[in-house]
Image: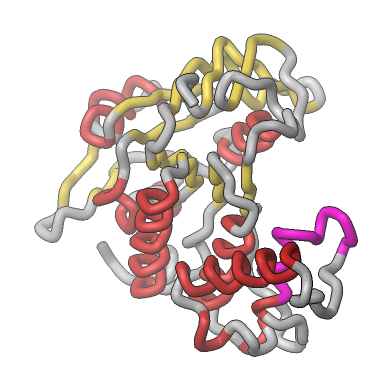
C-alpha cells in the first residue's frame, strides 16, 4: 500500500460539550512503530477509537491506508486496554486466539475445526503459527486465567495477529506487566512488526520499555498532539511548549527518560510497579 498507514488532518472529536481531540494533524507511515504518550485524559484512547471509526469526528479527516475509518477492506487489529483475566476463567489460550479468527461470526469459537477440510487445516495452521510466533506454544492449552500477565498478553497479541492485519492498535499493552515482562513484550511486538510488515500504534504511559524500537512518538496533552522522532518530541523545549509550563526531560545513566514538572509525573515516563528510574 502506497498511502500512509494513518493520516489525520485537523481532526476534532467532541464527547458531550468537550473537545477530546483538538485540531490533531499527524501522519504515520506504513511499517512504523509509533508510541502515543501523555497523561490520563489527554485523548490517547480517543485517538485510537477515532482511527477505528468507533467515535465520530466533528471536523477534519481520518484515513487508514487511504480508506475511511471502519472500512472493511483495511485490516486493522485492536487490542483494548485490559488489566487481567479472572483467575477462574477456564477458556484455553488457544481458544482465545481463535476468537480473532472466527469470533466475529460466532461470538465464541466453535469447539473444534474439521481438519479433514482444506479450510479447517489452513485455519488450524494459522492459529498454531501465530501462537508459535509469539512464543506461547508451551502453555496455549492451559486456561487463560491460570497464566501470568506476560503469558496472557502474548496470547492476546496472537489473537490480534491471526487475521493478518496491516495495522495493529494497542492500548497500554504493557501497563499491567512487571519490568521484565514489559521488556519482553515490547521486543516481541517489534519482532512481529518487522516479520509481518505491520504498522504499530501503541498507547503507553512509560516510553522507556519501547524506546529502542520506536520510529516516531505522538505526545498528547489536552487533546492536542505533537508528532516526531523521540529525540525531538520528548524534549524539554517541546513538552514545555505543549503543556505551556516548564518541563525538564532528563536522561538517566542507563539511557532511560524521566520527565520532571509534568502535571502527572509518576504516570508518564516512570515505572508504575514501584521501581525507581
Q: Is residue 68 left or right of residue 180?
A: right
In the rendered image of this protein, does residue 255 appear above or below residue 121?
Answer: above
Rendering coords of residue 125 (x, y %): 61, 70
Identity of the residue furthest to the right in this view: 106
Q: Please report the residue visible at 41 percent of the width from the left and 27 percent of the height from the top.
A: 29
Is 72 in front, or is 216? 72
Q: Is residue 121 left or right of residue 258?
A: right
Is 151 in front, or is 250? 151
Q: Please report the residue visible at 54 percent of the width from the left and 45 percent of the height from the top.
A: 168
Is 3 in front, or is 242? 3
Colour style of the rendered protein structure: secondary structure
- What residue range appears in magenta? 95-107
Q: Is residue 104 left or right of residue 77?
A: right
Q: State yes or no: residue 98 in magenta.
A: yes
Is 162 in front, or is 238? 162
In the rendered image of this protein, does residue 97 appear above or below residue 160?
Answer: below
Q: Please report the residue visible at 24 percent of the width from the left and 24 percent of the height from the top.
A: 237
Q: Please report the residue visible at 57 percent of the width from the left and 10 percent of the height from the top.
A: 10
What predominant SS class does the magenta segment belong to?
A: helix
Rendering coords of residue 198 (x, y %): 46, 44
Residue 41 appears in which quarter of the rendering?
top right
In the rendered image of this protein, does residue 268 appear above or below residue 72?
Answer: below
Q: Is residue 156 left or right of residue 216?
A: right
Quadrant showing the C terminus:
bottom left
Amino acid at each position: 500500500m502506497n498511502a500512509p498507514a494513518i493520516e489525520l488532518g485537523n481532526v476534532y472529536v467532541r464527547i458531550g460539550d468537550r473537545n477530546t481531540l483538538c485540531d490533531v494533524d499527524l501522519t504515520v507511515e506504513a511499517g512504523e512503530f509509533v508510541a502515543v504518550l501523555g497523561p490520563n485524559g489527554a485523548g490517547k484512547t480517543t485517538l485510537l477509537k477515532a482511527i477505528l471509526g468507533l467515535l465520530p469526528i466533528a471536523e477534519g479527516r481520518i484515513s487508514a491506508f487511504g480508506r475511511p475509518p471502519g472500512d472493511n477492506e483495511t485490516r486493522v487489529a485492536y487490542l483494548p486496554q485490559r488489566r487481567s483475566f479472572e483467575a477462574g476463567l477456564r477458556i484455553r489460550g488457544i481458544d482465545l486466539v481463535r476468537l480473532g479468527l472466527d469470533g466475529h461470526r460466532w461470538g465464541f469459537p466453535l469447539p473444534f475445526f474439521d481438519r479433514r477440510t482444506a479450510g479447517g487445516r489452513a485455519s488450524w495452521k494459522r492459529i498454531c503459527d501465530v501462537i508459535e510466533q509469539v512464543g506461547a506454544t508451551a502453555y496455549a492449552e492451559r486456561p487463560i486465567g491460570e497464566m501470568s500477565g506476560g503469558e496472557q498478553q502474548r496470547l492476546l497479541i496472537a489473537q490480534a495477529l491471526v487475521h493478518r492485519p496491516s495495522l495493529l492498535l494497542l492500548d497500554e499493552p504493557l501497563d499491567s506487566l512487571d519490568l521484565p515482562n514489559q521488556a519482553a513484550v515490547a521486543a516481541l511486538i517489534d519482532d512481529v512488526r518487522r516479520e509481518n510488515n505491520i504498522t504499530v500504534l501503541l498507547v503507553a504511559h512509560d516510553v522507556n520499555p519501547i524506546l529502542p524500537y520506536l520510529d516516531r512518538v505522538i505526545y498528547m496533552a489536552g487533546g492536542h498532539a505533537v508528532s516526531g522522532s523521540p529525540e525531538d518530541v520528548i524534549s524539554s523545549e517541546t513538552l514545555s511548549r505543549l503543556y505551556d509550563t516548564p518541563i525538564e526531560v532528563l536522561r538517566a545513566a542507563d539511557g532511560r527518560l524521566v520527565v520532571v514538572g509534568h502535571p502527572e509525573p509518576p504516570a508518564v515516563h516512570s515505572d508504575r510497579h514501584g521501581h525507581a528510574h
